[in-house]
Amino acid sequence: MELSVYLNGKFVPQSEAKVSVFDHGLLYGDGVFEGIRAYGGRIFKLERHIDRLYTSAKAIDLTIPHTKEAFAGIIKETCRKNGIRDGYIRPIVTRGVGDLGIDPRKCKDGATVVVIAQRGISLYGDAYERGLKVVTASVRRIPPDSLSPSIKSLNYLNNILGRIEANRVGADEALLLDAQGFVAEATADNFFIIKDNVMMTPYSSTSLPGITRETALELAPKVGVTAVERPFTLYEVWAADEAFITGTAAEIGPVVEVDGRTIGDGRPGKITKKLIKAFRDLVTATGTPIG
Ligand SMILES: Cc1ncc(COP(=O)(O)O)c(C=O)c1O
């Protein structure tokens, strides 16, 4: 059955959910988006995702033509229209339709607003049982003084270039370093290592401030580790006891190999497994009811 997609104030069938070729989201990647997940009829950390969407929009000086409360309502309504209890939700806000030329002032009619909600999502299939293989990409994460990685914008080419490198060598994910050579994040996920019961992830100045990342940091005491945010190098990754990625779509994914080096004993780590369980308990017990 076709999905019902929210598009600029209306719900339309998936096959009719189309935007203009003059939309600046398409022409220039001028827009922002979110990836949100629903578990058992509840939307996990909906307010945090809406806050990040609005902060991303603010950073690119884009006005979203709804209050945050109204936007939350649209998201819930899109889920209800599609009978979503467990699923993935993708709000997108572009600069809108305008003439050719990057100037945002050309988009006189305001933003294009889209919300897609679909059932289920499995990013890495059975790879979680064996653990993920990651390679370091040659391309660096865009520095925050060029285009802040904290903005969840429609401009994902930097990440896609990394993804292509992973695909070429049959890896599950690629790791991007920052301009100084410290680990930044994976192409669509944040990155963590664990060494001697300390869980580490880089500051979010060179990565997206991931909501799953934030959740993993909150859950650290529950699984008996100390959590710190600090820069670290590839050397520390290769020498780690455990490693994992976090993301709304990926959830918490154990990493067992980086650049051909085995992490720990080459199997998903004990603490990572505890964290996956704690995460699952949290996402199924909390969240905004879809209604
Ligand atoms: C570049 C990047 N980093 C990290 C993440 C993880 O963020 P979150 O946990 O909020 O989904 C994502 C996912 O959207 C991403 O695209």
Image (spheres, rainbow, N blue to C red):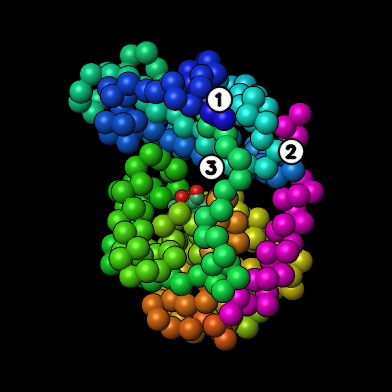
The residue type indicated by label 2 comes to: Gly
Q: Residues within 10 Å of mark 3 (few under 14, many from 20)?
A: some
Q: Which mark is residue 4?
A: 1
Which residues make up the magenta segment? 267-291
Viewer-side label of 3, 1 = 1
Q: Residues within 10 Å of mark 1 (few under 14, many from 20)?
A: many
- Give me the C-alpha separation between circle 3 and circle 2: 16 Å
The residue type indicated by label 1 comes to: Ser
Give the x, y percent position of residue 178: 36, 63
The residue type indicated by label 3 comes to: Gly
The residue sitting at 28% across, 24% down in the picture is 21
Q: Could you tell which of marks 3 and 2 lies nearer the N-terminus?
A: 3
Q: Is mark 3 within 8 Å of ligand 1?
A: yes
The reply to whether the magenta stretch includes residue 240 is: no
| Residue with the mark numbered 2 | 41
The residue sitting at 60% across, 75% down in the picture is 268
- Give me the C-alpha separation between circle 2 and circle 1: 18 Å
- Give me the C-alpha separation between circle 3 and circle 1: 17 Å
| Residue with the mark numbered 3 | 35
The residue sitting at 39% across, 65% down in the picture is 174
Give the x, y percent position of residue 117: 57, 34
For the residues bearing labels 2 and 1, Cβ distance under 8 angstroms:
no
Give the x, y percent position of residue 58: 45, 32
- On the rendered image, what quadrant is the N terminus found in? top right
